[in-house]
Amino acid sequence: MNRAEREAAVRRVMEETPPSVPPELYPEVMRRGGRMLRRRTAARRLLWLLLCAAAVAFFVWAMVARPWVEPPSETTPPLTGW
Amino acid sequence: MRQRQASQGARRAREFEAFVAGAAGRLLHAATLLTAEAPDDNPRARRLLTLALAHTYARWHRLRGEDPYDHTRQYLATRFARAAWHQYGGLGRARPHPDSALAVLAPQERLILVLRLYEGVAEAQTAALLGLPTERVRTICDRATATLLHPPRGPAPAVVPTKVVSS
């Protein structure tokens, strides 16, 4: 028996007695798949929301703190009695 | 916006139902061969297929251009490989049913045999999917073929000469 014949014999063994598809398979798939899809959508929305909140928080902080403005010097002694 | 989403969902459900109607039989047969259960009593194969199909459904709209059958089969195979790895040596959890065609084989041999011969996936593709070298896939496939055609209790010595002659 060469390789092709052996493979054909194995295929024949595997092809016999196919199982029948149960009718409740499709509703179960839809239920699980729909749940998976809803969860993914919710997770994506939550992440976008977090990103937006972080951006807004950063903007507000930057407007209030103005970190790019040079802070007034604190080392020079005050000019008094001149 | 909401209306467009609803119509998109309806179209997805229609397309997916047609896909399941066409592919479920063959995929369930493959899954039953993988789990080595009897054709009329295959709860593990059904669970495996349900998970794989649900995964395909969840990704349906991002699957453009990719074959959904291919995707489902790939998910089924990797999921089975992972489960078989975790249950390796488990006490009787995954004992093959004697009615199954592939009951004499180990889980990895069943997986490779089903992918290579039942589904007709190319050797290199199988190797890439399972993360094995191509030669190893060929070796396991040959060994599984020999075991299946000449079960260990039968005329075992006949396996070696035929292999030498054919290669």
Image (tube, coloured by chain):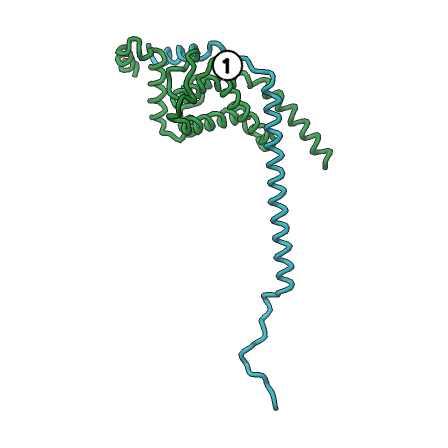
Chain colours: A cyan, B green
Q: Work out whether residue A82 or residue B85 is closer to the camera in this orientation and state it.
A: B85
Q: Which residue is mark 1?
A: B41
Tell me the amino acid under the disc marked 1: Asp
Up-down: is A20 above or below B132? above
**Splitting the image into 4 quarters, where does residue B117 fall?**
top left
Q: Pick out the residue farthest to the bottom.
A: A82
Q: Work out whether residue A27 or residue B117 is closer to the camera in this orientation and state it.
A: A27
How crowded is the residue under tag 1: few (<14 C-alpha within 10 Å), some, or many (20+)?
few
Where residue B154 appears, x then y in whole percent?
31, 9
Q: Pick out the residue farthest to the right.
A: B3
**Splitting the image into 4 quarters, where does residue A42 fall?**
top right
**Splitting the image into 4 quarters, where does residue B147 fall?**
top left
Q: Work out whether residue B39 or residue B116 is closer to the camera in this orientation and state it.
A: B39
Does residue B109 show up?
Answer: yes
Q: Pick out the residue farthest to the front.
A: B91
Up-down: is B113 above or below A61? above
Provide the secondary structure element on which disc 1 rests: loop
The quadrant of the rendering that contains the N terminus of chain B is: top right
Up-down: is B106 above or below B66? above
Where residue B79 appears, x then y in whole percent?
47, 28
Q: Is residue A18 left or right of residue B161?
A: right
The quadrant of the rendering that contains the C terminus of chain B is: top left
Residue at 54% in and 16% down: B25
Q: Work out whether residue B17 or residue B39 is closer to the camera in this orientation and state it.
A: B39
Where residue B83 appears, x then y in whole percent?
44, 27
Does residue A11 show up?
Answer: no
